[in-house]
């Protein structure tokens, strides 16, 4: 069963997320909220402001009110759930939290955001200390920013905003793009194994920073092989592929294959005959970015990467162009998901 935490974190710094403003950060800096790494803690480590925390922490309130922080999503999208992680905040966590969202495209100032229309995503809800507090979100619109509020004060280690990226297709024009990229609206439809790390690492921005920033499977003890299926940003024609095994030195796959599937064909995705080759089974080298120009192929909506027999992939990039119909469909979806349409 897929839960919202299986979806990408749209707020993570790795995708370009940032904490734009907070009303207070007296004890610990607001930027920690969107760090990709899990929070850490070293007891009895004191700075000039007190115990050092890997998170955002405000002063103790002596007057009515609440504390807040505004986060720009690295990948705007439909938010399916939020995790307010209070790891290591045991006597200084907020007893209640709430989360709102807004959609302001472009590069708004903090003043612009203050004047925006904010919608409640998570109503004021109880929170526990030293806990990953999860809250489902039912609003179906696309958001670009979120505002976390602590009632009344305290500390939060990380804010995870899980959902489905929805890129602004106006930025695509008719140019070739990475059809697999999370930032462009690509996603992982399925994976055979994610024992060591998440499959969506392989379609994240930038070069892999370490082995932990790759997709990596457990060691296989049978005759099978591992794979991920990528849902492309839209129906398009893949013209070039990059299979990057950087940092995978003793656990890189021995070989890989790419196949495409077109949902417009009305054939079931589990029909093996409906899949066509993009890249035949090809030997790979450890710790190497491999780039391939592909032979002409039909349009696809999904691409499956098979690795033999196991291992991982630092990054998978699939460069190509959306079909005109797919680009039109993305424009319509982007407009339909705008929470400001019809707002007073």
Image (cartoon, rainbow, N blue to C red):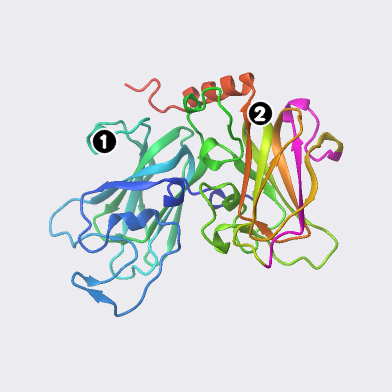
Q: As rendered, which of 175 and 213 lies closer to the eye?
A: 175
Q: As rendered, which of 241 and 110 lies closer to the eye?
A: 241
Q: Position of residue 186 (x, y in %)?
A: 59, 39
Q: Which mark is residue 47?
A: none
Write the residue at 31% across / 63% down. 93
Mark 2 residue crowding within 10 angstroms, few (<14) / some (14–19) / many (20+): many
Q: As rendered, which of 177 and 134 lies closer to the eye?
A: 177
Tag 2, which secondary structure? strand
Up/down of 125 relative to 301, above or below: below
Write the residue at 36% across / 30% down. 106
Mark 1 residue crowding within 10 angstroms, few (<14) / some (14–19) / many (20+): few
| Image position of 217 (left or right of 166) | right
| Image position of 74 (left or right of 107) | right
Write the residue at 53% across / 48% down. 8
Q: Which residue is mark 1?
A: 109
| Image position of 325 (left or right of 26) | right
> Magenta span covers which residues?
250-272
């Amino acid at each position: 069963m897929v839960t919202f935490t299986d979806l990408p974190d749209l707020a993570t710094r790795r995708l370009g997320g940032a904490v734009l403003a907070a009303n207070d950060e007296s004890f610990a800096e607001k930027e920690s909220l969107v760090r990709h790494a899990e929070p850490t803690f070293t007891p009895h480590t004191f700075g000039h402001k007190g115990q050092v925390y890997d998170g955002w922490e405000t002063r103790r309130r002596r007057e009515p009110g609440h504390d807040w922080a505004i986060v720009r999503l690295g990948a705007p999208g439909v938010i399916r759930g939020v995790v307010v992680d209070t790891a290591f905040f045991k006597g200084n966590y907020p007893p209640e939290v709430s989360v709102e969202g807004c959609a302001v495209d472009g590069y708004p100032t903090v003043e612009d955001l203050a004047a925006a229309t904010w919608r409640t995503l998570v109503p004021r809800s109880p929170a526990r200390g030293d806990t990953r507090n999860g809250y489902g979100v039912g609003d179906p619109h696309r958001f670009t920013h979120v505002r976390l509020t602590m009632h009344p004060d305290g500390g939060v280690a990380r804010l995870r905003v899980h959902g489905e990226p929805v890129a602004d297709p106006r930025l695509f024009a008719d140019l070739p793009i990475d059809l697999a990229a999370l930032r462009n609206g690509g996603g992982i439809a399925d994976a055979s194994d994610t024992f060591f790390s998440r499959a969506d690492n392989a379609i994240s921005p930038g070069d892999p920073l370490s082995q932990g920033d790759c997709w990596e499977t457990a060691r296989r003890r049978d005759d099978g092989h591992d794979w991920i299926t990528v849902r492309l940003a839209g129906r398009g024609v893949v013209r070039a592929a990059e299979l990057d095994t950087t940092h995978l030195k003793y656990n890189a796959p021995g070989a890989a294959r790419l196949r495409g599937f077109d949902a417009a064909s009305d054939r079931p995705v589990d029909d093996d005959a409906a899949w066509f080759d993009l890249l035949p089974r090809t030997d790979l080298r450890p710790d190497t970015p491999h780039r391939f120009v592909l032979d002409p192929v039909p349009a696809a909506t999904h691409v499956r990467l098979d690795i033999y027999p196991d291992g991982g992939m630092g990054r998978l990039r699939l460069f190509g162009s959306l079909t005109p119909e797919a680009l039109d469909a993305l424009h319509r979806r982007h407009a339909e998901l705008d929470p400001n349409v019809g707002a007073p």
